[in-house]
Amino acid sequence: MNVDREAAEQILLSQVLGLAVAGPLAVVDTEAAIFVVLAEDQQDWLVRFEKDGQFPAAEWAHHMVDVYNDRLRRGDTGDRWQARPPGMHLDG
């Protein structure tokens, strides 16, 4: 699957910032995919990362949850949110 990851990241970022998610997020790891879900309703997923052996799905999902939950705890609504995990680059 050939994906323009930078474009996908921008779409994801705009969607997440537009959502009214009031509670914390969690990660659900299944055999085929890793999901970012609402912590209180783990059947309601926000993001699905396929386990394809090439893309670091778990790292991205856990980073997304950690950043979001940390910002939720701090009440920080600034624009410093970094969607990609530290050290991850989209040029390759």
Image (spheres, rainbow, N blue to C red):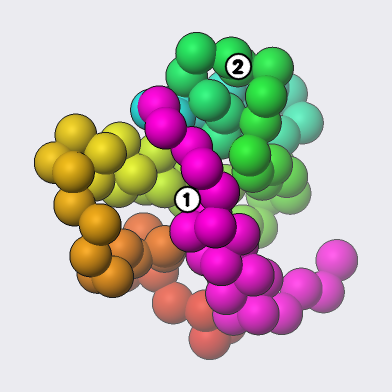
Identify the magenta region: 1-23
* Rendered image quadrant of residue 84: bottom left
Quadrant where the C terminus sits is: bottom right
**Residue 24 appears in view:** yes
| Quadrant location of the N terminus in the rendered image | bottom right
Can residue 86 be seen by looking at this rendering?
no
In the rendering, at what x and y percent does residue 29 appear? Answer: 59, 24
Q: Residues within 10 Å of mark 2 (few under 14, many from 20)?
A: some
Q: Horizontal and vertical percent for residue 83?
A: 42, 62
In this rendering, the count of numbered labels is 2
Looking at the image, tell me whether mark 1 or mark 2 is earlier in sequence order.
Answer: 2
* Mark 2: secondary structure: strand
Q: Tell me the residue at 65%/80% (across/down).
A: 7
Give the quadrant of residue 24: top left
Note whether 15 is above or below 61 in the view shown.
below
Q: Is residue 27 left or right of residue 75?
A: right
Camera-side residue of 92 and 16 = 16
Residue 40 in the figure: left or right of residue 53 = left
Along the line of sight, the residue nearer the viewer: 60 or 41: 41
Report the residue at 19% width, 52% height from top.
Answer: 76
Q: Which mark is residue 42?
A: 2
Name of the residue lying farthest toward the right: 1
Q: Relative to 26, say whether 60 is above or below.
A: below
> Residue 60 got which mark?
1
Estimate the x, y position of residue 23 in percent, counting from the top left.
40, 27
**Magenta span includes 2:** yes
What's under tag 2, amino acid-wise? Answer: Gln
